Image (cartoon, rainbow, N blue to C red):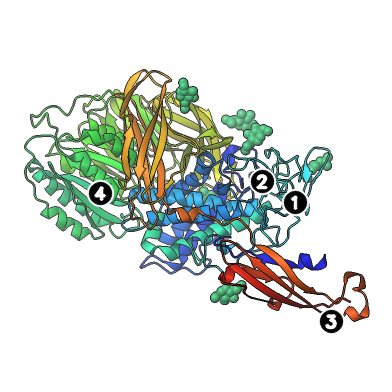
Amino acid sequence: MLFARAILLLLGMGAVNGFHPNHESGDLDPGDFTDTDITEKGILKAVSWFMETSPIPGKFPKAPGELADKNSTELFKAYFEADVSPDRFVKALEEIVKGNNQVEVDNGEDSSYFFHCGEIAKSIAQLRALRKAMLVSLEEPVTLAGLESARLNAGKALHVLQKFYSNTNWVEMGNDDIYEFLINEDSNVTVPIAPASIATCKDCVKNISGVYTCVDNILVKDMLVSGYKISATCKTKPQGQCGHGGKNDTTQDTYPTGGINKETSDPKLSPHAHLHKKAAELAIQATKNFFVEGDASLLTMVDQEIFRKFFNLKGYSLVFVIDTTSSMADDIAQVKEKSIQLIQKFSTLPDAPFNYIVVPFNDPDHGPAFKTHNVNELKNYISRLTVDGGDDCPEMSLSGLKLALDESLPSSKIYSFTDASAKDEHLKEQVKIKIDATLSEVNYLLTGTCSKRKRGSVTKRIARASERGYENIYEEIATYSGGFYVLTTKPELSRVLGVMELSLNAAPVKVTQARLDGTRFSFPVDETLTEITVSVKNMRSSRFSMTIRTPSGATARNTKTLIDTTNHKIVKVSPIQERGSWTVTVSPSSSYEVEIGGKSLLDFSYQIMQKQRDYMLPIQGRPIKGSSYAISLKMLGDAKGVKVKHLVSISERGTARSVPLNQTSDALGNVLAIATLPFDSSMSLLKVEGLSPNNLPFSRVSSSPIRTESVEVLPLPGQKGTMSPGETLRLSVVVVNDGTPASFSFKVWDDRSFLRSFSPKSSFLRTGQNITLTATFEAPVRQDKFVSSIATFTAESSTAQNYLKLPIAVITETALETDITPPGYNLMQLKMPCAEDSQNQPECFRHIWRMTFSVKDDHSDVNVKVNPNPTGVSCHPAGTDGDKDVICDYKFVSLCS
Ligand SMILES: *[C@@H]1O[C@H](CO)[C@@H](O)[C@H](O)[C@H]1NC(C)=O
Ligand SMILES: *[C@@H]1O[C@H](CO)[C@@H](O)[C@H](O)[C@H]1NC(C)=O
Ligand SMILES: *[C@@H]1O[C@H](CO)[C@@H](O)[C@H](O)[C@H]1NC(C)=O
Ligand SMILES: *[C@@H]1O[C@H](CO)[C@@H](O)[C@H](O)[C@H]1NC(C)=O
Ligand SMILES: *[C@@H]1O[C@H](CO)[C@@H](O)[C@H](O)[C@H]1NC(C)=O
Ligand SMILES: *[C@@H]1O[C@H](CO)[C@@H](O)[C@H](O)[C@H]1NC(C)=O
């Protein structure tokens, strides 16, 4: 019937597998857009738009479009008008990407995270719920855990959002713009969803190589349809319903064959491969609008300050964690004198920190944290610190550090001053988990130990879980975070405070780090380095001398000594007179730890990955000792023309293992490389070696070491992380002991105190044995809005510990309810003077067609839209049900000729 096709019912209801996760999962053309590429590109567009509209005070305002299409390094250079490393922003971005990729593991069997199986309304509800979970984590006061949870939820929401463009027929409908309604409930442009009762696709044609050609296989033109892919929530593909398609779709050979996905540009994986680029472009645009510009974007929901925090656009904090017990009076005076002088010198440079924080600690108190942007206020505050008490030696130093980590910006530089050991050593694991989350660097400047104050011994060597052995917990934490540990005396403190100058660097890198047994050490200095620092520590704690030489053999000029104690020297060289292989010569021959740092915009970031549910995805928690992992590297900064050659893992003992790297790139042109590496050591550093853009050898070392564990904490798949107000939620993890038999104790906590109980508290596990740890969380009853939190599960024995973080959210039940029954309609009257068989008769011309019909829905109001002549329709309520039950008249002037 001619007219039937002309009628479209728009369902005005309460609401009316995609791109591949990443290039590491293989099988893709480098130019294909993955979830990772789309997320990164969309975010770069959003952040550059933000930077153009929100200039830094005192810098030149940017013209619209001036920062567009820059990579992160160029973007930060242009915004700050200086060499400022984008590493903190890259970290935030990676966390969002991780949330996005994590959906494949956590929710891979739930079609509503993929717009699969006609679950369009449910996917939209899922997307909105995840977006709300992100927003509530960003409510003031914004915490570290809140930011982490917000980024994870943003990544998950973006996963659902991006799949809309690869897995529904939005692109095939001819749309050149994004579908704003997905995140904006108030958008008045809505598109109907095809009811399950109608056939949406026809068979595709298979060619002799067994590949389907799916041209025009979608039967529905004006309604949204999605492809079916079998999952736990979607057991069958009904007759007539479009398939997802591709060789990994188990139903691609049943009617209707083929499918509609645009995930890749490979027709074997994606029947609509020819629309991949278009779908990706819209997904990138939608990602940008999720954060800026759109009517419901993040920037319209939170203030600028929070937006900056979310993307780590703020720079770093310089933090002092100071022991204020009586014996510290001299030390504090010296910190005030020397350090503030130094900080003042840098305070107007782009290298200066974003803010300064001081956390005092004593016994039994610590805090509160003092924060300022002003160096003079910092100086005044430090002068006013009063010292008292602390007669029994150990103090609450880790509590102070923990507060400092909570209060500071990510990748901050923390200096802790004390002359006593820690009374709160039990916080060590929590502190380390916070260091993992912030990537902040903790430096310890000790002017004594409890043993010297004749109270117990701080210098019992900690051999636990370490091949190297630490002098004390402070050295262990400093090493863990990639910071310095300096033990000196009170009179000598001023001679080591210069070490702080190393922190006043907006683009810090590590060039190399190694154990030297002998007298000579060489390292490469490439053209991107604008300063270098040489740190040498004699492991035998005895006196030594050192000389630094340039490639031509000349003694280094422009040097400045930052630390000069008996067994530890740090020298800074700036500017650098010559490039190439530099040499450090020490005397006498001994065992030394050498670390070369510097300032450069050439660096790398990495992810530790593992095959999970068919994809190569980032692992959660720490890697397992003795296992092999894929290390995915991404070069950052002035990386164009770089050739990466080797990935080296350096163990705590200083032994190195090198594997060759195969260089590739992603859709954004980033230099990527992937290699498989066994993790045999309990701690190792990663080093990348290769040739710089100017063909000079270069190397870079990860800022903090990777710690491996012999216990795993794994999520049980398919658990939902949401609960309704007043409800309880049970979350379980499996703890697997991969090490020697041991007794483990377990802990669970969350930042909003939703935890009610967990069990067991401890257990003995043989090698290979596992146990399920279950925690119960309870949401407050009177909770009318969304709230989210992060639950941390830890397992710890005397030699091993690991953890897992799971996001949890309180969501009112109605938020996820969707109306999926379509309204029904009934034709009441039709006046069509010009019948089909008389269409070509002259009397047919300019005849008026009229029809009357009723439309009814059980749950929500209906909207009626008719094509053609949309203005020809008028509806009124049929009874007392308002707009749920309406009668419509439609008039159309026929122009058949
Ligand atoms: C949606 O609402 C806006 C503002 O009220 C209006 O300008 C626009 O024309 C509306 N669009 C449609 C399709 O109704
Ligand atoms: C089958 O189709 C695919 C995708 O369009 C194409 O790459 C392949 O060459 C075709 N095979 C034959 C034998 O035509
Ligand atoms: C696709 O299926 C093949 C086997 O046909 C399997 O090896 C591969 O891991 C699957 N890929 C994905 C992404 O599911
Ligand atoms: C970023 O862009 C600049 C300018 O095009 C280029 O020199 C640099 O190598 C790029 N960095 C990366 C990591 O691609
Ligand atoms: C690097 O690529 C070559 C050739 O494609 C391959 O043979 C080799 O196994 C790859 N190496 C690594 C470490 O992946
Ligand atoms: C835990 O142990 C059980 C019984 O030995 C085993 O079937 C299961 O696969 C183990 N689970 C994990 C995650 O290792």
Say if residue 369 shows up in the picture.
yes
Residue at the image position 37 percent from the left and 58 percent from the top: 784
Q: Nearer the viewer, mark 2 or mark 4?
A: 2
The residue that mark 1 highlights is 201
Q: Earlier in the sequence, mark 3 or mark 1?
A: 1
The residue that mark 4 highlights is 319
Q: Secondary structure at mark 3?
A: loop
Query: In the drawing, does residue 769 fall left or right of residue 157?
Result: left
Q: Nearer the viewer, residue 387 or 687?
A: 387
Q: Secondary structure at mark 2?
A: loop
Q: Earlier in the sequence, mark 4 or mark 1?
A: 1
The residue that mark 3 highlights is 846
Q: Nearer the viewer, residue 27 or 249?
A: 249
Q: Nearer the viewer, mark 3 or mark 1?
A: 3
Q: Nearer the viewer, residue 343 or 758?
A: 758
The residue that mark 2 highlights is 228
